[in-house]
Amino acid sequence: MTGVRKLHDATIGDLFAGERRGGAERLAEGATLLRGFAAAEAAALVAAVGTVVADAPFRHMVTPGGYRMSVAMTNCGDAGWVTDRRGYRYDPADPETGRPWPAMPVVFSALATRAAAAGGFPGFAADACLVNRYEPGSRLSLHQDRNERDYAQPIVSVSLGLPATFLFGGLERSDRPRRFRLESGDVVVWGGPSRLVFHGVDTLADGDHPVTGRCRINLTLRKAR
Ligand code: SIN
Ligand code: FE2
């Protein structure tokens, strides 16, 4: 083998080793950013969002305080997260249609289980997926995910399309959030001591992405019940 060939093989080998180690970044105890974890599946995930949305279209929900959310949402799985003047909750049916939410695509649930395991939570089985669509100018203010029954179960959050700034705070609303840039295919897993961390998404910048066009899509996979 020539020296050049050896160098070439070593380089390719290192690249793949780096991908497998996967740029996992620990954000806090129980919280991990898995850079590019879903990158290879991004187009398939967006296609599956298309099938969900055909049944349960994106809509802008209203907070209990009467504000229209800038993020458009829908759900799939056994239950869907909804908000209206009556409050935040999980509902087995889509209030817009009265029908059950679309079934969760296997690409979603399989990814959630793999990502949770990579984040230190083996055996995770998501039963609900909130699908968020951010258009330029949309944002999601700091909040905790706390409508789920069992806080021992982690949250798996998948970014697709336009990049965003993820805000990751602490257990008090007043804790100053750290800012992380999330790219298409990045996955954040948080659970254990980080399960009730305040988090949000800063105002989405304009752009155009080959996978989603002019928006960002986020999948939040949870065990709701
Ligand atoms: C969420 O907290 O529901 C979504 C987070 C994100 O869009 O990254
Ligand atoms: Fe959230």
Image (cartoon, rainbow, N blue to C red):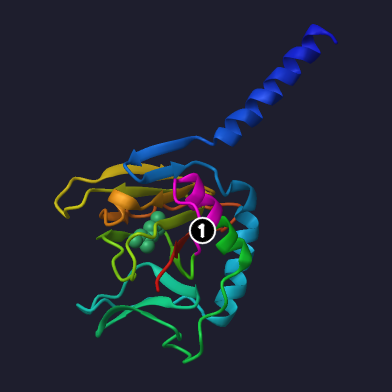
The extreme top residue here reads 3
Q: Quadrant of residue 8?
A: top right
The reply, left or right, for residue 210 in relation to residue 139 is right
Question: In the rendered image, which quarter contains the C terminus?
Answer: bottom left
The image shows residue 222 at horizontal and vertical percentages of 43, 65
Residue 137 in sight from this viewpoint = no
The image shows residue 30 at horizontal and vertical percentages of 35, 46
Residue underneath mark 1: 214
Vertical placement of 157 versus 183: above or below? Answer: below
Magenta residues, as a range? 112-125
Ligand 1 quadrant?
Answer: bottom left
Frontmost residue, 190 versus 46: 190
Dot 1, crowdedness within 10 Å: few (<14), some or many (≥20)? some
The image shows residue 214 at horizontal and vertical percentages of 51, 58
Frontmost residue, 139 versus 150: 150
Vertical placement of 132 versus 5: above or below? Answer: below
Vertical placement of 32 versus 90: above or below? Answer: above
Frontmost residue, 20 versus 124: 124
Q: Secondary structure at mark 1?
A: loop
Vertical placement of 37 versus 52: above or below? Answer: above
How many numbered discs, if any? Answer: 1
Question: In the rendered image, which quarter contains the N terminus?
Answer: top right
The extreme right residue here reads 1
The image shows residue 113 at horizontal and vertical percentages of 53, 56
- Of the residues shown, which amino acid type is indicated by label 1? Arg
The reply, left or right, for residue 40 in relation to residue 195 is right
